[in-house]
Amino acid sequence: MTTHPKEMNGAESVVRSLHAAGVDVCFANPGTSEMQFVDALDRTKLMHCVLGLFEGVVTGAADGYARMSGKPAVTLLHLAPGFANAAANLHNARKARVPMVNLVGDHALRHQKYDAPLSADIKGACAPFSDWVRSGRDAGSFASDAMEALRIAKGAPGRVATLIAPADIGWDEGGKMAAEIAPDGPVPLDGTALNAAVRALESGEKTVIIVGNSVLEDVAALALLQGIADKTGAQFVAPTSNRRMERGQGRVPVSKIPYAINDALARLAAYRHAILVESVPPVGFFAYPGKPSLLLPEACQIVTLAGVDGDGPMALATLADRIGAKPAKARTTAMPARPSAGAITLGSLAAALANALPDDAIVIDEAVTAGGALFPAGDAAKPNSWLALTGGSIGIGIPLSAGAAIARPDRPVITLQADGSAMYTIQGLWTQAREGSNVTTIILANRAYEILKGELHNVGAQPGEDALNMLNLDRPELDFVALARGMGVPGRRVEDVKELMHAIEDAAAEPGPFLIEAMI
């Protein structure tokens, strides 16, 4: 049993209480108001402390850690401006519904009335990107506040909980340990919804099952989903954006609702019934002239068998029992031929990736423009976990990889990273180098925000010189190999697809991070 002094300060009581409740990683970018936590983490040696050079790296890494470990890390952030830097990837974490606890330092209570230079409305800044916000009140109750934050974070579905930490209640003595509080479990299955789902499957009309979150992370649940489809003739699909999908040979392939609005509408147009399992009615990423916001047909009857706060695998098991469906047997997905020498295209890159991915790889997908073309590679490859951008806020790929690698250091991580979004959080490469993480980052270098060119056309615009100046990444061109080298990550630039495939295989087999700049 871990011992601790009878008298401790508020910061130490929080660190010890969180650790006793199973939190053992802290992703941090601390400042002056968090020095008491830095000291407590150092003295107790209870957590693995990971430094990010930008707060968006910190929260993105905590997201990746939660997706692969199934439990929250704690982040340490500096006042409202530091939280603001962290907010974009907290937005993604909320959309992924992952558990996370943020500790955000604040000025000492007695100092707050003076409007010091870093003073701001911290609660107001935190609220849009958190599911729960509270400010600590005194050293004696500080750990109890942290346990409430942890309870919220670990409830179903996972949530982002933010505890504001005034400096003085961290350094004041009188801290008291607090016990873990049981989180809220999944919402029980509703019998009325179950009956409605059975009727939809037995209606003889075209029915789609839209599955998300824990269903996509559970190989057995996916096999049962395929069995339900085989039994009833229903089809199934995943949302466009998903926190994690278990994919690869021997596992059930699940297609996604396309990102492009016309493709998404066409994909769902024929269905008369939709059964939602840990998902919500699909909506377009954006509004477009003359296009609907909701993607299912107006006449489609929607049944929520399990909401995002439900237990999707259990709901599918109960549904399968009602209709007499059994898990489907493992199926083999055709492997594309190994590409021969030639220029790197999206098609040849997908084939190279399918052949080169090592067994049990963790794939981080922030390919953005190339994402649709590369996604099928995950089904043909060896078994893998596929993590994607969930909230649309770009700049998550490199940090997400850093956190996933810390959660699972036994597994190779392969990052499919668009060049434009890489520049939002390129500092995450430094964290990978410092941690010695086995992450292979593939920069998809098309030298543009290519996806935005398509969006210009979607709203009826024809881009001219000034528009293209805002969308092209040239003058000067980025040198990602040099950027990586400057942060301690070796790399190489490749222009031939066969060379790219061998580079992926070699880098994944070697410990430590590596960057490949693939010229598309």
Image (spheres, rainbow, N blue to C red):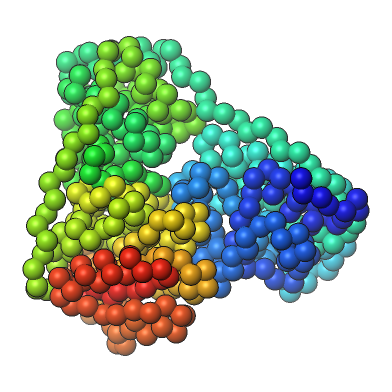
At horizontal 34% and vertical 54% (from top left) the residue drawn is 361
In the rendered image, residue 19, in percent from the top left (x then y), is placed at 69, 49
- Residue 307, quarter of picture: top left
In the rendered image, residue 228, in percent from the top left (x then y), is placed at 25, 22
- Residue 364, quarter of picture: bottom left
Quarter occupied by the N terminus:
top right
At horizontal 56% and vertical 52% (from top left) the residue drawn is 129
Residue closest to the eye, 47 or 66: 47
Position above or below: 274 against 402: above
Left or right: 112, with 505 as reference point: right
Residue closest to the eye, 234 or 292: 234
At horizontal 51% and vertical 65% (from top left) the residue drawn is 57
Please identify the residue farthest to the bottom as the structure is shown. Answer: 476
Left or right: 335, with 178 as reference point: left
- Residue 491, quarter of picture: bottom left
In the rendered image, residue 223, in percent from the top left (x then y), is placed at 28, 30
In the rendered image, residue 279, in percent from the top left (x then y), is placed at 39, 34
Left or right: 30, with 155 as reference point: right
Position above or below: 172 against 510: above
Q: Is residue 395 visible?
A: no
At horizontal 42% and vertical 52% (from top left) the residue drawn is 391
Left or right: 484, with 16 as reference point: left
Quarter occupied by the C terminus:
bottom left
Q: Is residue 510 visible?
A: yes
Residue closest to the eye, 145 or 299: 145
Number of residue marks: 0
